[in-house]
Amino acid sequence: MKFGIFNVPYATGYTAGRRSVEDVIEWDLQVTEWADRYGLDEAYFAEHYTLGTEPSPAPDLMIAAASQRTERIHLGAAAHLLPYHNPVALAHRIMWLDHMTHGRYIAGFAPGAYPSDAQLFGTGVNNPRMMNEALDIVDAILYRDIPFKIEGEYFTADMPAWDDSFKGPHLKPKRERIPAIMTGMQAKSPTLATAGRRGFFPLSQQVHNSILKEHWGTYADAASSAGHEPSRANWKVCRDTFVADTDEEARRLVLEGGMGSTWRDYNLDNFIELGIGQFLTGGTIPDSELTVEWMVDNLLIVGSPDTVAEKIERLYHEVGGFGTLISFGYEYSDDPEAYRRNFELLGTEVAPRLAHLNPAQ
């Protein structure tokens, strides 16, 4: 069992005017340092442009900065929003990051989910097609022999032949194959199906266990149909986790801290307004009854090391096994010691209790 952190970041203090952009950046880097120090395996950074509560327009820059402040943790984008990039330029940044991180970089690709970002870039409803076209170009630049030319509806790449005078084109990844992920939320997620077809790894967003089971089926069917062998060891599952020395302290730190306030004042309202509360509840309760307290008791993984380990193992067996559990990061800059302690307990107390879990194919 591996563990990770997903720095969205959730920044309600920034939108309330209590924290600066510099504060948001520094907090995410500090959280990533703690994750690295206490043995977590992966840290991800999101990409958004128009969301004040989730400010992160440049995951590649965050990965680059984090690579200079960490030693072993793998650093990923969740994800590069392909319609908003020239894929030729992005592919070269990806290769540069693979070298800069000494092979710790994880690529991540997505079409972009927020209409306001699509409006900003003028992509309309074309994001899924743009993503797939851009993926073909990124893959070619990373792995295809030169020269080649790809002419698409939205993007073009005309890779020249080797020029002995300029000693290029020259750049290739550090590794033979850079691991890549794609995220999904809805049960029959088209991006998870795309991940399966392309041989990428699946990352399931934070959803009810019943939907997680469908995620694996959607991904595995697509992978097998494309000739790839799906392995549950490569399945990454998002589920918020908070560990404290006692169950009572953990519950209090969630309900009264950054995780609880973010769900109460931001996430739950968005899920309910979008009509997707059932993604969290699995339809077990109506959206009107969805509260942070229900989340702590029924979905989130909160408690002492023993309790958290038991909940993770129960989740693992219920969905059939997975390789990495990833928690989103939250603002605890007003109580940083409690959040640091959460990572310490997760890495030194919880992880050893789950070392026996080894997902089958």
Image (tube, rainbow, N blue to C red):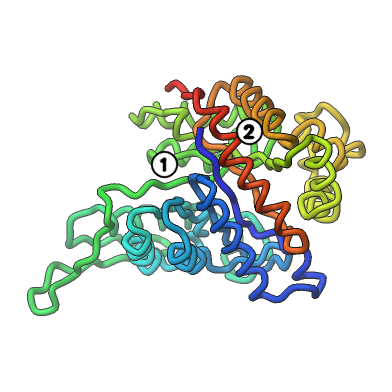
Q: Residue at x 17, y 60 (%)?
A: 146
* SS category of the residue bearing label 1: loop
Residue 171: image x %, image y %?
24, 65
* SS category of the residue bearing label 2: loop
Residue type at numbered disc 2: Ala
| Distance between the alpha carbons at the discs numbered 2 and 1 | 18 Å
Q: Is 65 drawn above or below residue 222 in the view shown?
A: below
Q: Which mark is residue 208?
A: none
Q: Quadrant of residue 163?
A: bottom left
Residue type at numbered disc 1: Phe
Mark 1, other Cα within 10 Å: few <14 / some 14–19 / many ≥20: many
Return the residue found at the far left.
164
Q: Quadrant of the C terminus?
A: top left
Give the camera-side residue of 40 and 341.
341
Q: Is 79 drawn above or below residue 315 in the view shown?
A: below
Q: Residue at x 86, y 30 (%)?
A: 285
Tags 2 and 1 in contact by the CB under 8 Å rule? no
Q: Quadrant of residue 117?
A: bottom right
Mark 2, other Cα within 10 Å: few <14 / some 14–19 / many ≥20: many
Residue 212: image x %, image y %?
62, 30
Give the camera-side residue of 233 and 151.
233
Image position of 251 (left or right of 188): right
Q: Residue at x 59, y 42 (%)?
A: 326
Residue 56: image x %, image y %?
60, 66
Return the residue found at the far bottom.
165
Image position of 289 (left or right of 222): right
Q: Which residue is mark 2?
A: 187
Image position of 20 (left or right of 82): right
Give the camera-side residue of 25 and 33.
33
Q: Quadrant of residue 116?
A: bottom right
Q: Which mark is residue 200?
A: 1
